[in-house]
Image (spheres, rainbow, N blue to C red):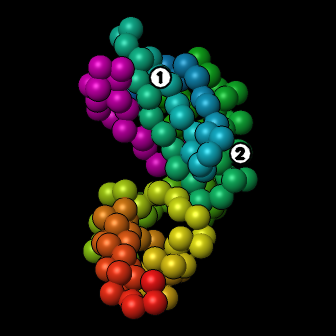
Amino acid sequence: MFRAGQPTWVGWNSKQLNQSKAETAVLKDVTLSTTALRCYLMIEHEGDEYLGALLFEDHNSCLGIYRLLFSHRGEVIRKVSEIDVPHSSTTAPIKPKTCKICGSIDNCDFKVMDDVWRTTIPIEYRNDIVCGECFENFVCERQIQLLRRKDV
């Protein structure tokens, strides 16, 4: 079985399509993300289009699944989901990023320049994932420390 995770299907009107109905939908298009390890899938069900995403741990798995799905455009999702894909830990979906400080999964996918990260984040968290809110808290703490220094 093809198991790169089941996407949540969201329509243009923000309406979601449940998984049982998605099985009868047709795979219309597959797009490879240029900035992340994900494939976007466009399906059609009863005249409405829905978008979903598959997330991967490495580029090769993402590209392989993209190519496979691309070759099955126009087929019913139920048929596509029965495709045999070699089982590999690299084709498993990635787990949501979780903040090491607060445990939140929200806003953990932002980027800052390396020097800002090193200056802002305490050394014990520099190799971990930190959410935007915790990052902002560290920024505030760092600014207060800088203001209190007499040589600044």
Q: Look at label 2 and name its amino acid.
A: Gly
Which image quadrant is residue 71 in?
Answer: top right
Classify mark 2: residues with Cα within 10 Å, few (<14), some (14-19) or many (20+): few
- Is 17 colored magenta in this rendering? yes
Which image quadrant is residue 131 in?
Answer: bottom left
Classify mark 1: residues with Cα within 10 Å, few (<14), some (14-19) or many (20+): many
Q: Position of residue 60 (x, y in %)?
A: 73, 53
Residue 59 or residue 107, whichever sits in front: 107
- Is 103 colored magenta in this rendering? no
* Residue 137 visible at all: yes
Residue 105 or residue 17, whichever sits in front: 105
Residue at the image point whose x is 54% and y is 79% from the top: 118
Q: Which residue is mark 1?
A: 43
Q: Position of residue 144 (x, y in %)?
A: 31, 80
Q: Which residue is mark 2?
A: 64
- In the figure, is residue 26 to the left or right of 30? left
Stretch of the chain drawn in magenta: 1-21
- Do tag 1 and tag 2 residues touch (Cβ < 8 Å)? no
Q: Split into 4 quadrants, where in the image is the C terminus?
A: bottom left
Q: Position of residue 32 (x, y in %)?
A: 64, 37
